[in-house]
Image: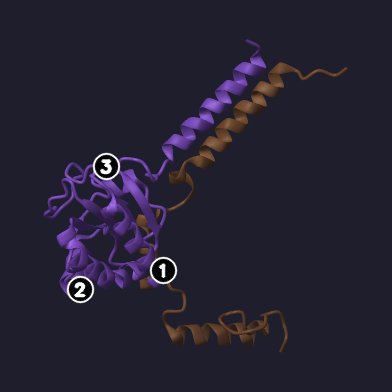
Chain colours: A brown, B purple
Amino acid sequence: MKTIRPFPAALFLALLASALGGCASPKLVRVQPWERAMLADEIMNPGRDSLATAMAEHTFFSRESAAGGQGVGGSGCGCN
Amino acid sequence: MSPLTKSCLLAALGLALAAVTRAEVKIGAAFPKLESAGLSGNLPDTVGKIVIVDFWASWCAPCKESFPFYGKLQQEYAARGVVIVAVSVDQKSADYDSFVKKLKPAFTTVHDREQKLVGAVKVPTMPTSYLLDRNGKVRAIHDGYHGEHTELVLRKEIDALLAEKN
């Protein structure tokens, strides 16, 4: 009958605990809800300049023959 | 004790510690003392009163939406011993000042400039409001502001607290 070797099991559990412990620290994984002033700023809105958005979309259409996927139905996968 | 048992215990301890470090203030817990939280602004007398602590920010749209309701609530319940304290978590004082100047809230607003209180409470979302009983214990938590639903539930909870004997 096979038995569990204690050292690898101990090592595995220690690694698991440290990994999960790291995940459990919210500071390491995400910006806190009260720290999102910068993210809520209008400058973070990629579509804030409608002219720039239209020009970028035109570039994608001309260069890649791709349209859509930015607030319109359908995909940008060569449907033109 | 075998090495396996030892490592199991260590792992459990590690996970428990990790859980403690990310603990939020939950229902039934004592809310941190507002007086010693380093807040800017004048705090109202909250001794023996039912307190609603609302965390907000000038950049948070639902927070702004909730202000007229809290103003109405304060007017309705002030005489019955309910106090609303709205804690701003704005990092810039200018943002806090201009927001308050513009909206002129009918309840107390204070500024948690260093974000010490909000960091201790660890609000799950913005806005979040905490309903505290007369002993400063958290009795209800409202994540976000959901218009009529929040208003209805909060009123019921306040009425239930008012009906309780001291």
On residue B158, which mark appears?
none
Instruction: Residue type at mark 1: give it.
Output: His
A25 sits to left or right of B142: right
Q: Within 10 angstroms of label 1, few (less than 14), some, or many (20 or more) residues?
A: few
On residue B149, which mark appears?
1
Instruction: Give the residue displayed 69% in from the left and 18% down from the top.
Output: A7
Which image quarter: residue A19?
Answer: top right
Disc 1 is placed on an element classified as helix
Mark yes or no: residue B147 visible.
no
Disc 3 is placed on an element classified as loop
On residue B103, which mark appears?
2
Q: Mark 2 lies on which chain?
A: B
| A30 up-or-down from A40: above or below | above
On residue B32, which mark appears?
3
Mark yes or no: residue B138 visible.
yes
Instruction: Residue type at mark 2: give it.
Output: Leu
- How far apart are labels 3 and 2 at the CA level? 27 Å
- Looking at the picture, do discs 3 and 1 lie on one chain? yes
Q: Which of B87 and A55 is in front in this view?
A: B87
- Looking at the picture, do discs 3 and 2 lie on one chain? yes
Q: Where is residue B7 in the image (x, y as percent from the top left)?
A: 61, 20
Instruction: Give the residue displayed 56% in from the left and 27% down from the top.
Output: B12
- Residue at the farthest right position: A1
| A18 up-or-down from B45: above or below | above
